[in-house]
Image (spheres, rainbow, N blue to C red):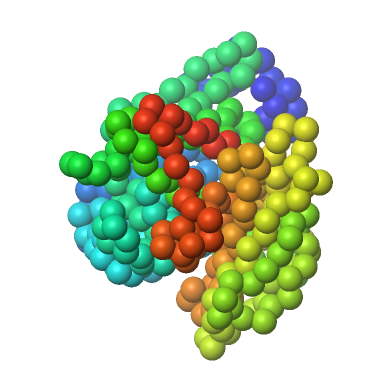
Amino acid sequence: MRLYGKQWTRREIEARVGSVAQIGGVRRLTLTEGKEAGTEVIEVRTGAGLSFEIIPSKGMDISLAQLWGTPISWQASNGNAHPAFYEPEGTGWLRTASGGLLMTCGLAHVGSPSQDETGSYGLHGRVHHTPARNVCIREEWVGDELEWSVSGIVEETAIFGSKLRLTRELSGKLGDNRIAIRDRVENFGFRPAEHMMLYHFNFGFPLLGERTEIRLPEADREVRANGGGAALESSVSWEAPNPDAEETVFYHSLRCEAVDEKGMAKATIVQPEFPTAGGMRATEVSLSWSADTLPLLVQWRMPGAGEHVLGLEPSNCRVEGRESERLRGGLFVLEPGQSVNYRLELNVD
C-alpha cells in the first residue's frame, strides 16, 4: 500500500503497529445525546487523511466527512437526528435531514411534496430516514492492500404498494482517499414500481470559500423555475455567506462528451487555500457517477448564512415531484424483478 508518501508491504506495516487500527480502519459507534440518541454510526478512517461517518440508522448515508480533521461536508443544524423523529408529511423532512456528505433521496419519490393516485409523498422521500438491515463491515488484506467495505440493505415497502430494495456497498482501501459507492435498487414486488433517485452530496466550509472553483461536466443547462439569477457556466466560483441569499437549483443534462470511457461523468471542487494543521494547501474533491443511470446533475446553490452549502446531486429525475415528472414524460419504472445499478465515486486529492 502507499501510505505517508511511500510504498509499504503488509508485513512492514504490521511490524510498526500493535494494531492497524492505529493508522485507520472501520468501527461502529452509537450516539447517546438529545435527538441523536440511538443513532448508529460507522466511522471510517482511511489513514491518508480522509475520515467520514456512515449512518446505518439513516439509509446508509454519509454524515460528517473530514480531510486531516478539517470538514469538507456541510452539516445541518439537525445533527444526526434519530429517524424516530422523522415527519414524512409535507416538508417535515427538513426538520431531521442530517446534511453531511450524502443524503439519498428516493426511492419512490424525490423533490417537492407531491400527491397522485398512489398516495401522498413528502419532500425527498423516505430512504434517508429508513434504517438499514444486514449491515456488514469488512476489513481484509488482499496482498499488500488492506481493503474495507460497509454494506447494508434499505427497503421501502407498503402493503398493496410498491416494494423497493436498495442494496448499498461503500468501499475503499487504507491509504487511499477514495469512497466507492455501489447501489442496486430492485423491485422485489409483483407489480411495476415507479422509482426516483437522487444523490444529495453536500459540500461546505472551508472547502467552500471565496476562491473556490466549481467545475461542472459538459451539459445542457437550465435554471429551475423561480430560481435565482446566478450564471449558468461550466466553471463557477463560490461566494461569502449572505443572510438574504435565496437557494437556486440548476439542471445539467449531460452531453456525450461529458462521459468517459468507463461511462462516468465528473464534477470537481477546487479550493486553493484549504486549511490543514501544516498550513494552507490546494485541495481538489471530485465526484464521479454513472451517466447511463444518472443522466442529470442537479446543482443546489445556497450561499446563505447558516445554510451555506453547495449540493451536487446526480439524479434520474428532477426535483418538482412525481406529478410534475409524470407531466414531463413519465417516471422511471422498474418492472417486477427488475433492478438498476448506480455507481458513484468520491476522490480527495
Q: Nearer the viewer, residue 302 or 55?
A: 302
Q: Residue furthest right?
A: 257
- With 251 as the anchor, is 321 left or right in this view? left
Q: Position of residue 338 (x, y in %)?
A: 43, 29
* Total numbered labels: 0
**Which residue sits at x=49%, y=73%?**
307
Quadrant for residue 3, please give it: top right
Q: Position of residue 17 (x, y in %)?
A: 53, 23
Q: Is residue 23 visible?
A: no
Q: Nearer the viewer, residue 294 or 25?
A: 294
Q: Residue furthest bottom?
A: 244
Q: Position of residue 266 (x, y in %)?
A: 71, 47
Q: Nearer the viewer, residue 94 or 26?
A: 94
Quadrant for residue 253, please give it: bottom right
Residue 177 higher or lower than 202, as above or below: above
- With 348 as the anchor, is 96 left or right in this view? left
Q: Is residue 258 visible?
A: yes
**Which residue sits at x=18%, y=41%?**
159
Quadrant into which the C terminus falls: top right
- With 99 as the anchor, is 67 left or right in this view? right
Quadrant into which the N terminus falls: top right
Quadrant for residue 46, please give it: top right
Residue 145 higher or lower than 209, as above or below: above
**Which residue sits at x=39%, y=54%?**
109
Q: Position of residue 135 (x, y in %)?
A: 33, 30
**Which residue sits at x=58%, y=28%?**
173
